[in-house]
Image: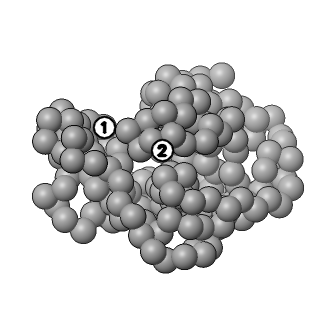
Amino acid sequence: MTIKEIARMGDPILRKVATPYPINKIGSFEFNQLVQDMQETLHFAQGIGLAAPQIKVSSQLVVIEIKDTSSRYGEIPAIPFSVYINPTINVINAETKGYWEGCLSVPGMMGFVERPQHIVINYLDQQANSQSLELKGFLATVFQHEFDHLQGKLYVDQLKDMQLFAFEDEYKLYHQQTE
């Protein structure tokens, strides 16, 4: 398998709505290779989530893996490497909370984004089984961030205050201690 180049902000593929992944191809050699490439790329980039458009594949497929459960956001549940195909989001409670987000496609930058904190996602798993998952807090933010990529959106599109958009070093220097 292969570590893929990650598309960066400005690449037109990141602004295109991704095509639903064909259900009849789930489990195929092509599918398994794509998932393995995404896993290797995610690990190499040291991220927690990656959407297929970020490796220049316009398909509705996201991988997420959270190993380190202690972060600047407090303790969060670990998530083993998981695949989410053709996902949808339903907001259970529209109350929002903001977090500083970063993105592999917007390297070196951080932005403060407010998102709903109680959602349910529906998706197909690696065996093409329908699944549903309820998420709250920071995990709800993670999934919304990744699923935005499938709609041609980046976290920078969600910024309400451009004064809360910074290089990572300046975020650490001026903003991290205020969280």
Report which quarter residue 90 is drawn in: bottom right
Mark 1: give few (<14), some (14-19) or many (20+) Cα within 10 Å: few
Amino acid type at circle 2 is Gln
User: Where's residue 22, x and y in %?
Assistant: 76, 57
- Please tell me which residue lies in front, 34 or 131: 131
The answer to whether residue 54 is above or below residue 67 is below
Q: Which residue is drawn at 68% across and 51% down?
A: 84
Q: What element carries label 2?
A: helix
Residue 107 has which mark? 1
Q: Does residue 41 appear in this view?
A: no
Q: In which quarter of the image is the N terminus?
A: top right
- Please tell me which residue lies in front, 81 or 106: 81
Q: Residue at x 56, y 67 (%)?
A: 118
Q: Is residue 38 left or right of residue 126?
A: left
**Which mark sits nearer the N-terminus, 1 or 2?**
2
Check disc 2 and report the residue beneath it: 54
Q: Which residue is drawn at 22% across and 41% down?
A: 177
Asked if the residue under mark 2 is in contact with the one under mark 1, i.e. CB atoms within 8 Å, the reply is no
